[in-house]
């Protein structure tokens, strides 16, 4: 599976699409290659609930305060849902 | 979704969260990190 640390909703969606459906810009090596890997943003609750809270706070806590995590979570979930719907 | 025992690709970004940080977090959940990178678009 893939864990992202992307800072914006757009980059989260771009990475997630590339790792599931293939490179949407058709410019890179993954153009047309549907890896269909499950992609999560590292700040999503599904991930956060499973990790050591001390390590999470130390490594990600500050970034989480600065980033607009709700939009990042929504972008990753949007792509996962789309892949599930097409399966 | 269960991270324990899963192989994880950690794709970090300099302006967001570093790949190394994602890797440490994933390992703490019992996952195996198979690739860890931090991209920079500056």
Image (spheres, rainbow, N blue to C red):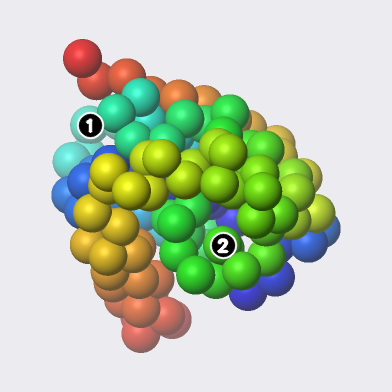
Q: Tell me where residue B12 sits by quadrant.
A: top left
Question: Which residue, as the protein is rendered here, is positioned at the far top?
Answer: B42
Instruction: Tell me where residue A17 appears, x and y as whole percent.
Output: 32, 55
Count residues near mark 1 (Cα–Cα under 10 Å), then give few for <14, some for 14-19, many for 20+: few
Query: How many numbered tags mark residues here?
Result: 2
| In the rendered image, the vertical position of residue B7 relative to residue B38, given as above or below | below
Closer to viewer: mark 2 or mark 1? 2
**To which chain does the residue with label 2 belong?**
A
Instruction: Tell me where residue A68 appears, x and y as whole percent.
Output: 23, 54
Can the viewer see residue A20 in this picture?
A: yes
Determine which residue is flagged by label 1: A27
Q: Which residue is painted at 47% across and 37% down in the image? A: B11
Where residue A48 is drawn, which disc sits there?
Answer: 2
Instruction: Tell me where residue A36 appears, x and y as whole percent.
Output: 48, 61
Q: Nearer the viewer, residue A10 or A52?
A: A52
Q: Nearer the viewer, residue B23 or A31?
A: B23
| In the rendered image, the vertical position of residue A31 relative to residue B30, given as above or below | above
| In the rendered image, the vertical position of residue B36 relative to residue B10, given as above or below | above
Q: Is A51 on the left or on the right of B15, as rendered?
A: right
Q: Which residue is painted at 35% across and 85% down in the image? A: A85
Q: Secondary structure at mark 2?
A: helix
Q: Nearer the viewer, residue A54 or A19?
A: A54
Q: Which residue is painted at 21% across and 14% down in the image? A: B42
Mark sitting earlier along the chain (2/1): 1
Q: Tell me where residue A55 sits by quadrant.
A: top right
Image quadrant holding the C terminus of chain A, namely bottom left
Q: Which residue is painted at 34% across and 64% down in the image? A: A73
Count residues near mark 2 (Cα–Cα under 10 Å), then give few for <14, some for 14-19, many for 20+: some
Instruction: Tell me where residue A1 appears, x and y as whole percent.
Output: 59, 55
């Amino acid at each position: 599976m893939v864990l992202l640390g992307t800072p914006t909703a757009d980059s989260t969606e771009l990475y997630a699409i590339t790792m599931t459906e293939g490179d949407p810009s058709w410019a890179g090596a993954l153009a047309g290659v549907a890896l269909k890997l499950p992609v999560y943003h590292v700040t999503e609750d599904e991930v956060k609930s499973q990790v050591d809270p001390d390590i999470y706070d130390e490594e990600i806590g500050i970034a989480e305060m600065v980033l607009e995590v709700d939009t990042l979570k929504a972008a990753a979930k949007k792509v996962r849902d789309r892949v599930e719907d097409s399966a | 979704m269960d991270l324990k025992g899963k192989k994880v690709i950690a794709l970090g970004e300099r302006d967001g969260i570093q790949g190394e940080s994602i890797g440490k977090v994933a390992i703490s959940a019992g996952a195996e990190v198979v690739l860890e990178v931090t991209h920079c678009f500056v």
